[in-house]
Image: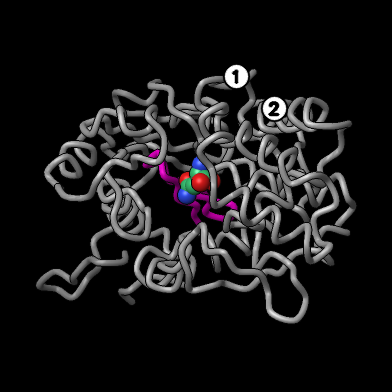
Amino acid sequence: MAGATRDSLGAMPSRRDARTYDLKDLRDRVMRESGGAVDDSIPQLAEADPELLGIAIVLPDGSVRTTEQADVAFSVQSAVKPFLFALALLDTDGEVLDRIGIEPTGEAFDAIKLESGTGRPPNPMVNAGALLTAAVVDGDGVEGRNERILRGLSAFAGRELTVDEDVARNEHLLGDRNHALAHLMRSEGTLRISADDAVAVYARACAVLVDVEALAVMGATLAFGGVNPVTGKRVVPAAVARDVVSVMATCGVYDGSGRWMRRVGIPAKSSVSGAIVLSVPETLGAAVISPPLDEQGTSVRGSKACDLLSAELDLHVFGSLGD
Ligand code: GLN
């Protein structure tokens, strides 16, 4: 078990079982963590309750285990990016891979930077990339793409999701860096719809309302090869799920991705709402929400919860620390 020490006989304590793992105790321990600041890019995020903490895990048999506050709604923000990438791969039959990089940037999520030489967004987990993936999904105009995205995200979640229209409006109005990125991509010829339409579609995708229960099911659908373990329905082909989880592993926590992979060892995506979605291949999906963020824009308590989950359920994809 990662993080565990051998007892006096040299034996490793037995691996805890996710079916009986004490999530309430996990939440209590994570609550003791402090620090970070709530995002203030739009009023709705600035008003988030800093004490909100919800955790959900989804097991291979589709059972969902939750803590209190697992049903509190929040805007998905950047945790939508893996799912936009999945829909873009699906709708373009993989052609989007010619128009977007898949290398980590070592830079912030909204860095005004495209891949040198090609003018492509560096990867689908940063804003430039998500503006592009949202722009290439099926659908006519802003409306058609919005519908396609909401339908696709709902299939990942296994329930009908809705949009917080005020968040969508503010993301569109106040997302100056996203407008800048969209114009930059237009000038490079990588974005083929209008810059304003691209920002509108992406802003509305960020404003989709989820709770950690829905987000954990979404993460689980990627973890289980594209099949939603709750509904039993295939949402994307296994090859798409594998591509998305691979890029979550390398780019999901922006300029903290390398450290995250070493420490937590789980493909993940962070977001400014304070949510983190986790996909442990063939093992489980999980999500945490806690709004105060560190400098990389990752939830402080969420990160702690992921550390503990990884160590205590032995989830590091590159193996245990012990024997
Ligand atoms: N709404 C945010 C933006 O694009 C999402 C960013 C994030 O969650 N890191 O600016």
Q: Quadrant of the N terminus?
A: bottom left
Whether residue 254 appears in magenta in the rendering, the answer is no
Instruction: Tell me which residue sits at (59%, 21%) in the image.
Output: 163
Whether tag 2 and tag 1 are in contact, CB under 8 A, the answer is yes
Frontmost residue, 267 versus 58: 267
Instruction: Tell me which residue sits at (30%, 27%) in the image.
Output: 47
Region rendered in magenta: 267-285
Whether residue 278 appears in magenta in the rendering, the answer is yes
Residue marked by disc 1: 162
Residue marked by disc 2: 150
Q: Position of residue 215 (x, y in %)?
A: 51, 35
> Mark 2: which amino acid?
Leu
> Mark 1: which amino acid?
Thr
Q: Is residue 78 visible?
A: no
Q: Position of residue 260 (x, y in %)?
A: 39, 66
Name the side, left or right, on which 291 lies relative to 145: left
